[in-house]
Amino acid sequence: MKTSIATVSLSGSLTTKLAAIAEAGFDGIEIFEQDFLASDFTPAEVGRMVRDHGLEITLFQPFRDFEGLPEPHRSRALARVERKFELMTQLGTDLMLVCSTTHPAAIGGIDRMAQDFRDLGDLAARHGIRVGFEALCWGRFVNDHRDAWEVVRRADHPNVGLILDSFHTLARRIDPSSIRAIPGDRIFFVQLADAPAIDMDLLYWSRHYRNMPGEGDLDVAGFMQAVVATGYAGSLSLEIFNDQFRSGLPRMVAQDGHRSLIALMDQVRRAEPTAAPDLPRFPPPAPVERIEYIEFATSAAEAPALESLLASLGFEAGGRHVSKPVTLWRQGGVNVLVNSDLSGFAHSSYVTHGTTVSEIALMVPDARAAFQRARALLARPLVQDTQPGQLAIPAIRGVSGNVIRLLDGTSDLAGIWQVDFRADPARHGAGITGIDHIGQTMAYDEMLSWSLFYTSIFDAEKAPMVDVVDPDGLVRSRAVRSGGLRVTLNGADARHTLAGRFIEDSFGASVQHVAFASDDIFATATALAERGFATLKIGANYYDDVQARFGLDPGMVARMQAASIMYDEDAGGQFFQLYSEPRADGFFFEIVQRQGNYAGYGAPNAPFRIAAQKRAARPAGMPRH
Ligand SMILES: O=C(O)c1ccc(O)c(O)c1
Ligand SMILES: [Mg+2]
């Protein structure tokens, strides 16, 4: 499998793009003519720069408005294309993309178009060039790959083939299995892009909202399965027009692109028995069973405040690490580590972000297999500093460089609490039974990247994006779920939102909240109150509305109000939630109770919760910012 990416997919100058593309591990690039025109290099220099990076130019594009034109436009188009063939020879590439016409003078006609391509094939052959025809989904006469294929078939020229682009096919909801009837050697090139399901003008959607396979909602895997069934053996190339990527970090976008292609081809080889991509073997994705522990990095000075907050949540000190200043806090199957080590990863995490969740340990069916898969999907490993006699727990870097440890219950790793800690079981507690989810806050630009991280490494699904209204701006939120792991990714642009301030105050993306599960949130609320837990107060207006909206029993609403418990429901069930007051750095805890199959996270309550958190964080009478 040769991988390629179009230069339009990344930000920066051509030089920056090439470096990022090569570093991410691609084999080639599609050169967009605009990128070449905007550069100061000669075509030969560009060709050399590309090859010096170990890359090849897989495609030159686009050539527009060629087919179905009357004279004199037709002759002019042929003269124009010949100039581009000369340019391509100097660049050192032999494949040109011709996209279906949108020219106002074009008159269409399938045999006329086929004849145009036959003549173009003759001209291309004289230059040692091949041309591929792509149906733009907004093309005037050809806007469906089946029609483009019919033109190519009738042109019947060895130098003329078909170019497929998943976006154009899937955006028009064309069944990709129609590709299975096309001979693979007549497909000259395959472009891949995903996109979020938004109802809008096709051209605008294509030019601004495309994203990496797996980041959107289109069935790119189904498309790719059909492509491999044809025996197509050429490049797989990402062609991603996306406003965010155009201004994003080119290295991050290029790496996400490469990750998306590996994940896609892995998915395809498992679904399509004939597919044999030359992709190294690695384990299939597995669901996460649960979060086995979360670890806070802190300092000796700040640890007591965190520990008394944990105690007010019903946690009990349950052990110490055998060799490091790490204490274990336990309750109802939840393990929280408080690490005030002055060396190692936790310390550097504390120095960078302040008291923060520096590690999340995931219980998976096979930790070493999960690690192998993560590595194959380009996750960065954490270099271990294990002492003799302690467990070497496989670890990768997650959001903001945090550590994700991988544990299982079947290998030696199952002994973590006995080997690394002299752990006692928790006794009393406040009714917390598990970790329901964690909330990770990041710049909006990073959201696609981290959702791809989770969904490609684990057997995970992403929920639709929801808007969360903060009094000072909009925050976008999307949940990712893998078995017992639920993560909400919150993307903030606006600096004054609670999430935006948290990013600034903690110097980068991080876990902003941890939500614990309870089977009886009213009993838990009472137990927390006895322990002096500082519950976030929710005002009376909210409860009037919630009672009217859901037609709840007034007695229950009164109990909810007394305990500042918020409520939501969906088709599957009911949801209760309460919050801690935010810490000075913006971090907070949440307690939730799910009933039935409630699938959400209480998003409708978020605006009121955020407003209350902002009031709690700002003593009365203080200015807003
Ligand atoms: O938006 C366009 O015009 C355009 C050009 C070339 C392509 O390959 C494509 O998919 C779209
Ligand atoms: Mg295309």
Image: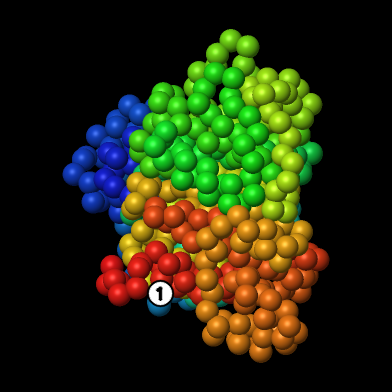
Extreme residue in the top direction: 388
Closer-to-camera residue (344/141): 344
* SS state under label 1: loop
| Residue 98 falls left or right of residue 320 | left
> Is 19 placed above or below 256 here?
above
Residue 141: horizontal and vertical position, in percent?
A: 54, 72
Question: Would you say residue 287 is visible in this rendering?
Answer: no
| Residue drawn where x is 55% and y is 13% of the image | 387
> Is 279 placed above or below 185 here?
above
Extreme residue in the front direction: 530
Question: Would you say residue 581 is visible in this rendering?
Answer: yes
Amino acid type at image mark 1:
Pro
| Residue 559 falls left or right of residue 538 | right
Residue tagged 1 = 471
Closer-to-camera residue (28/334): 334
Residue 165: horizontal and vertical position, in percent?
A: 55, 55
Extreme residue in the bottom direction: 548
| Residue drawn where x is 42% and y is 33% of the image | 300
Q: Quadrant of the C terminus?
A: bottom left
| Residue drawn where x is 57% and y is 47% of the image | 310
How many marks the image carries: the answer is 1
- Using the rendered view, name the quadrant where residue 422 is placed: top right
Residue 356: horizontal and vertical position, in percent?
A: 46, 43
Residue 384: horizontal and vertical position, in percent?
A: 52, 20
Q: Quadrant of the N terminus?
A: top right
